[in-house]
Amino acid sequence: MQDRIDTILQHYNVTTVEDIRDQKSRADAYLASVEIEKLRINAEISNPEVIHQFNSGNFDMKFPVYRFLARQRWEKNDRLLLMDRLENMKVIPDTLPTLYPRVDMKLRFPGKTTHWIDPGRIMSTGVTAQAPEFSIQIFEDATKLYTIVIVDPDTPDLESDSYKTTLHYILADVRISGNEPLVDKAIARELVPYLPPHPEKNSGYHRYAVWVFEQPDGERLAVQQREGKDPVNVDSLLERERFDIRLFRSAHGLKAVGAHFWRNGYDSKTEGVREKFGLGPGNVYTHKRFQHYEDYRE
């Protein structure tokens, strides 16, 4: 195995895999780096010490074998749970039409929940009054930029006797590496401040969908006017009311790679949240909305 790795490194006249990846002008450089990573995984995958360190949680994601094992465990467990709830609760397709998850997205609320919450959990509006903390675990040796968007597709629309989507948060230029999954908001860019959930009485449970988008070419997100056949007004892209997440995604060339969601209903804390953040009184609906999906409670 080591002989094959040495041969590849000599072929590119480099000493490390990272040096190969830097040769972006060579079309076969990426494939060579992937081959080396596979060789290293195969050499360590059956090592009892590696298995012990992984099972005990004492491992470093900078090593290919641990990234491989972590991805394998995620795909067999948490990713299946996520997709089951996104589809059964109609987050897909009510927000975006589909998703093939490539990152493990987790969230929790500061000062209220010390553990990461499961997708679809019903939360108190008092708990969700502050913006959540995020973790985005990628399974490759890279550093990428992401955009996080939170929307509520269950806002009652009295004009159409239906529902509209409300934008609750956009955090762009989130820098994540395989070994540093926690989102550092201080070095990211908040395009739209967090709007605390405040469902109106008898409007049922609202789904707060959190989408993770990979930014193209590792570049900062440029929210700008788009001209041409389908011009887009930059101001309309960031409007909270009737937010079009599909248009926002396509206008910036974003790729959906992860998602999560929680739910809020009107509760004993909602009026306090409205008062604290100056959101005004809400409507009271006569009939409670019928829920078309199973009620996951924890």
Image: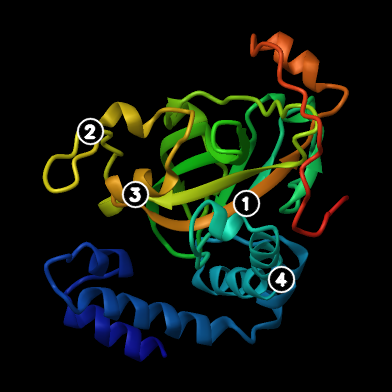
Q: Residue at x 64, y 62 (%)?
A: 59
Label 4 to label 1, Cα distance in Å?
Answer: 15 Å
**Which image quadrant for residue 19?**
bottom left
Q: Mark 1: few, some, or many residues within 10 Å (few <14, many ≥20)?
A: many
- Disc 1 marks a residue whose amino acid type is His
Determine whether the residue tagged by mark 3 lies in a helix, strand or loop.
loop
- Disc 2 marks a residue whose amino acid type is Gln
In front of the other: label 2 or label 3? Answer: 2
* Residue corresponding to mark 3: 215
Q: Position of residue 250 (x, y in %)?
A: 31, 51
Label 1 to label 3, Cα distance in Å?
Answer: 18 Å
* Residue corresponding to mark 4: 77
Looking at the image, tell me whether mark 2 or mark 3 is earlier in sequence order: 3
- Disc 4 marks a residue whose amino acid type is Asn
**Which image quadrant for residue 55?**
bottom right
Q: Position of residue 24 (x, y in %)?
A: 17, 65
Quadrant, the N terminus: bottom left
Q: In this view of the protein, which residue sits in the foreground, 35 or 209? A: 209
Q: In this view of the protein, which residue sits in the foreground, 252 or 242? A: 242
Q: In this view of the protein, which residue sits in the foreground, 137 or 199? A: 199
Image label count: 4
- Disc 3 marks a residue whose amino acid type is Gln
